[in-house]
Amino acid sequence: MKNFATENIHRWSIAYHWLKKYVDLAFRQYYKITITGLENIPFNEPLIFTPNHQNALMDALAVLTMRTWQPVFLSRGDIFQNPRIRKILTFCKMIPVFRMRDGYHTVQLNDETFRNTRAVLKNCNGLVILPEGNHLGTKKLRPLKKGVARIALQSQEDANHDLRIKIVPVGLEFSNYKLFGSPLLIRLGEPVAVEPYIMNYRENPARGINLLMDTLRDGMIKEMIHIEDEQNHDTILSFVHLLAYHSDEYKKLKPGTNQRFEHDKQAISYLENLRLAQNDLYIKIIKETESAVKALRQQGLKADDIIYAKSNMAAMLTRAIILIASFPVFAWSFANNVLPIALARWFGSRFKDPHFIPSARFVAGLVALPVFWLLQILVIGLNVRFGWTTVAYMATLPLTALVVYQWRKQFYIMQKQVKFNTIPIARFPLFLRLTELSKRIRSFGR
């Protein structure tokens, strides 16, 4: 296998800069992003960023979109086999890391990878490594690969005090992995200095690596939602949502905000401590929560829909009137975007891994939307001889995409409200049961 020509990957690329601007703009529409801790990160120093990995490509894009910069990502070496793919990945500032399973001869190519990572660190570009190795859509930090510690310690050792490498734990909290426009919280934790672990690494490399990995793991867990009990993972998340039913204070905390994150983390921490100290009570809470979730499921609802349970009838009526009045605008907007939307959804459906679907849809939309818009502008222009009508049409196309998103969002909210408030047969037993269960759950959470 030939050299991967990544020796200049740390250099600023103007083409990459403009592509990144477009990707950032699109990504910030796909998710409503909140970032905390950015002001405490010394970006003029050699840094390694380690986000949790739950949402495939979207995790890398979340880190990329944090600021105007050009970080370099470490990725699996096997995807670099095809020369054309290799060029694209290198342009996207990705460096291959090879494993024994890729073939013993390929592991030698890691020497080049380590040289490039040292250049990236020395240039203070920012090196991004997803230490879990692969993605899984659960709120839990899985075992970390030790490669990040090896790279950090070896680079620090080779630099001989010239570098002060730090590892930044990053927590990514997606309120909904797939839903367009859903909140995303990015939390940057306190940087972990690598140099204090060098003496341990010199005396006993395995011990030095393990000590650094333990510190990194603690730092990452602090910045993300981490549920230790995998068996009851979904029920615990439902418990957190059901806490809102009798808490006006909680309902004011919007998903994706740091305040909501802290509240949810506190509730999950309470349950985890209870699981270890009073398992009988913990099991009781789990069963009560499962009963509440079952009652909701019978009405086609989920635990996170509970926020619509006490909707004001006047507000519901107002929303319905607005939706009906604006339907012609929505229909026109949808007609202008239906083809790229359909293509993106079709492309996402081609992947068996459900947690790769949002990445596939995003990439497809990134390409399809401007292509279809350009074709539509050409069609309109050819029919009206590219006059002011064409200019006006071109200017309104981005607005039509926003109209489609907002109208559909408000429509789905109204659906949930209607299910909770206007099903006369189910309403009394459902609310009676939910009230009883939610009061118990809330009393548990105190």
Image: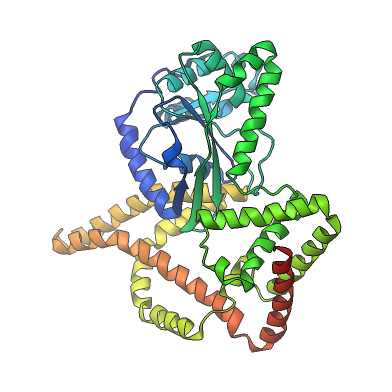
* Quarter of the view holding residue 162: top left
Residue 56 horizontal side relative to residue 406, left or right: right
Coordinates of residue 147 in the picture (x, y in percent): 62, 24
352 in relation to 246, above or below: above
**Which residue, as the protein is rendered here, is positioned at the far front?**
446
Residue 239 horizontal side relative to residue 27, left or right: right
Q: Is 283 in front, or is 331?
A: 283
25 in relation to 308, above or below: above
**Which residue, as the protein is rendered here, is positioned at the far right?**
280
Coordinates of residue 298 in the picture (x, y in percent): 71, 75
Coordinates of residue 276 in the picture (x, y in percent): 81, 49
Q: Is residue 132 visible?
A: no
Total numbered labels: 0
Residue under the point 86% across and 59% down: 280
* Quarter of the view holding residue 108: top right
Residue under the point 35% across and 23% down: 11
Coordinates of residue 255 in the picture (x, y in percent): 53, 60
Residue under the point 74% across and 64% down: 444
Residue 79 horizontal side relative to residue 205, left or right: left
What's the coloring here?
rainbow
Q: Is 42 in front, or is 60?
A: 42
Q: Is residue 39 visible?
A: yes
- Location of the C terminus by quadrant is bottom right
